[in-house]
Image (cartoon, rainbow, N blue to C red):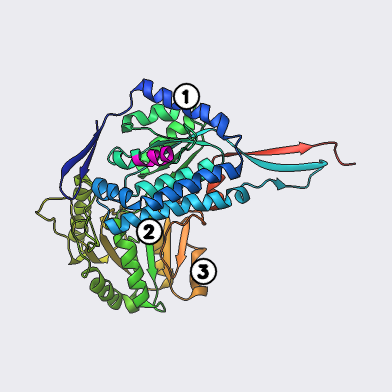
Amino acid sequence: MLQAINPATEELVREVQPFNQQQLHRAMEAAEGSFQRWRKTSFKERAQVLKAAASYMKEHCNELAPLMTEEMGKPIKEARGEVMKAAWCAEHYAEHAEQYLATEHIESDASRSYVQYLPLGPVLGILPWNAPFWLAFRFCAPTLMAGNTCLMKHDPHVPGCAAAIEKIFEAIDAPSGILQNLPLTRDDAEGAIRHPAVRGVSFTGSTRGGSAVAAVAASELKPAVLELGGSDPAVVLADASLETAADVITLSRIINAGQSCIAAKRIIVEASVYTQMVELLQSRLQQLTLGDPALETTDVGPLARPDLRDNLHRQVRESISSGARCLLGGEMPEYKGYFYPVTLLADVTNDMTASCEETFGPVASVIKAEDAEHALAIANDSEYGLGAAVWTSTERGEAMARELVTGQVAVNGIVKTDPRLPSGGVKRSGYGRELGPHGIREFVNAQQVWVGPKKG
């Protein structure tokens, strides 16, 4: 049984029976059958469906957002923002997919030669709980606009969100079978990947989970896109606008109670401004309100599960034992709910647990660097390579971006996902790209066409 437990109250709010093998097979057949029709539709016809889905989400935002607050603890004001961002993603691909997948004419010895981008078939999206609507549309909007159909295996802890996403397409009378929710356990994921109807896999989640998915997909010779964990550095140099940097880094660190792969996790500060930056961060972090995510006044809600909180607390305590100074938080609350206080660790080094491992919660770790070169070395000294931020002069920041081993760099800004721009990681943060023109080309057949006769 798939169960959703409200992390603020620890109460069971929803139970869903997972698919059996017969139900899964019927869904796969439906995805394949709908693909044969959907692939022949025009970009205009596909765009009409995505725009209708976006309009529905906007109109029903106040019904959809509370599902996230209830099932995974996202503060309600953030949950509404997520629904609107998912709608934006649908609109963006509705408007730009045809341009992104336009046929490319390339000169050769042929009378005419070109590359055209054709759909592959049903694509399986294996999604996490931390951004249920945004990550679903980050997966399905480009996939559908490319002419593929979508099979969505959402996290077992957000079954209500998953069902609501499928119902969006039912409510707008989208063609049957183009997006289906697969309520499956984690143990059932391998069978879904191996099913002959599935032509590609998109996975967002942990590095360990991504490794398992990649191995199965590779054994079936199916393409996969993996967006995995991160321990993103935010480098702050002496010539940065410290007040602005502190504002943005604070926001980056505590969005979704810090449960974000691309959040600023290692704050690396040049020595000459280190003390000042720590003070600026502390003054901002201590003003945040931890509490009931259903309240408009709440800045930081609970963590999604008790095991996540226990692991985060272990990382904090181990880092303190290794010499980190705890300036805020760091103590496990005794009241109901999976809450963890906003925590600030100073004098962290890159060999401490809070740096070596991904901290998935409202814990900011500040590291001192001797100079810009040392800061860059610390930033790259990680098994992860998802995103990074640099706070310095524009010219210097852009030069440093070339040296950062990450899939995404923000110079004097927040690391974020944007439908217009590709995102993804390197090293143990995954491979492939999502969003932008690059993301929609991950699950297509880039077919080369040579038309004779051969040139004279």
Q: How many marks?
A: 3
* Residue 196 higher or lower than 40, as above or below: above
Answer few, some or many: residues within 10 Å of disc 3's Cα (few below 14, many 20 plus, some between 14 and 19).
Answer: some
Residue 349 location (% of width, % of height):
29, 63
Using the image, tell me which numbered label, if any, was put on residue 29. 1
Residue 157 location (% of width, % of height):
27, 40
Quarter of the image that includes the N terminus? top left
Quarter of the image that includes the C terminus? top right
* Residue 413 higher or lower than 293, as above or below: below
Residue closest to the far right: 456
Q: Amino acid at mark 3?
A: Glu
Answer few, some or many: residues within 10 Å of disc 2's Cα (few below 14, many 20 plus, some between 14 and 19).
Answer: many
Secondary structure type for disc 3: helix
Using the image, tell me which numbered label, if any, was put on residue 232. 2
> Left or right: 46 with respect to 63?
right
Task: Kindly report the secondary structure that dominates the magenta region of the rendered protein.
Answer: helix
Residue 194 location (% of width, % of height):
44, 27
The foreground one among 31 and 200 is 31
Q: Is residue 170 magenta?
A: yes
The region drawn magenta spans 164-171
The foreground one among 258 and 374 is 258
Tag 3 or tag 2, which sits nearer the N-term?
Answer: 2
Indicate the quadrant where residue 12 lies.
top left
Indicate the quadrant where residue 361 lies.
bottom left
